[in-house]
Image (cartoon, rainbow, N blue to C red):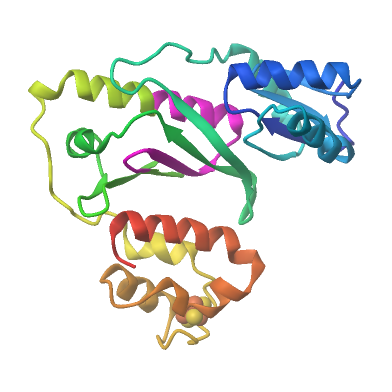
Amino acid sequence: MEIEKDKKYEIIVFPNQDEGLKAQRILVSRGEDFKHISTLAVVVPEDRRQEACRSIIDSDALISGYYPFLYRDYEEDFFKRAEAYKADTADGTFLKTITLCYVAPCMADEKKIRLIAYLNRDITEILPYLNAVIKGASYNKRVSTLTFAKERRLINLYNMKITIAKADDIIDAWHILDEVKALVNKTHDNKSNIKPNYEEKVKVTALQIYGWLPKTNCRACGEATCLAFACRLLLGEQKISKCEPLSMDSRFTENKKIMQEMAEALGVS
Ligand code: SF4
């Protein structure tokens, strides 16, 4: 299938190579129009996405999710980057596999995606070591989470799960997951040379939280401004649910999810 600039497309993502190969065989056998990105994802015309997903699921193959592929000039290198990406299929020494289970567009930013991936084992014991090696990470021992930013992306590491918000696209997401896997294994292998850091410093700032809020200063939460709300949320004196526009307005659904993950990881709400 040739990609045309004026047409709308969607990317369907698969959890691993086996499921991706199975799904693509199903699409071929059903005569579906699609473009292979890699064994882990395909592009389909927007108006065929539903049918393609149904064919795959009905044939007992799995998908992780889908999101719009908004073809723009700068995305001409998307397929080159996809071709250059080599999926990490090697079992790690400690963390063997990460399986991408959920992919969706960021509602707050149509150019970005968010995702959830599951780990094949519990990494709780490594989190304090990662807290020592990742600059600016926020560790919460009580709920076993580590939160850190990679440029504009927000990454939450749980005992058996990773969430990433604001990844550029699926290729960016695959690279981040591979980097996390490599970092966890390297940190585990080098444990004896790392002093674990159990410090639970909150390194997310009120201004970063403010960035996710509606910024209307409507006072529905009882605070005079959104910034005041952000400060009190960090102190554990406010709850995300008190921001009415965040809960009621669908434009902020994605922001609310991101804030909930961040607050859960930081143990503040
Ligand atoms: S309810 Fe939400 S939008 Fe309104 S002032 Fe409070 S934080 Fe800001």
Q: At 43% from the left edge and 66% from the top edge, which residue is drawn?
A: 210
Depth check, front residue: 139 or 64:
64
Depth check, front residue: 150 or 239:
239
Q: Give left or right: position of 211 versus 104.
A: left
Q: Give left or right: position of 114 versus 143.
A: right
- Measured as percent of width and height from the top left, residue 136 is found at 26, 44
- Measured as percent of width and height from the top left, residue 243 is found at 48, 77
Q: Give left or right: position of 41 versus 223.
A: right
In magenta segment, residue 172: yes
Quarter placement of the C terminus: bottom left
Quarter placement of the N terminus: top right
Q: Quadrant of residue 142?
A: bottom left
Q: Specify the segment rendered in magenta.
A: 157-179
**Position of 185 relative to 251 (above/below):** above
**Position of 149 relative to 238 (above/below):** above
In magenta segment, residue 9: no
Q: At 64% from the left edge and 22% from the top edge, which residue is drawn?
A: 19
Q: Quadrant of residue 122?
A: top left
Q: At 88% from the left edge and 24% from the top edge, which residue is drawn?
A: 32
- Measured as percent of width and height from the top left, residue 268 is found at 30, 65
Q: At 75% from the left edge and 19% from the top edge, which residue is drawn?
A: 24
**Position of 215 relative to 160 (above/below):** below
For the question of whether residue 9 can be seen, the reply is no
Q: Quadrant of residue 159?
A: top left
For the question of whether residue 254 can be seen, the reply is yes
Depth check, front residue: 171 or 206:
171
- Measured as percent of width and height from the top left, residue 232 is found at 31, 75
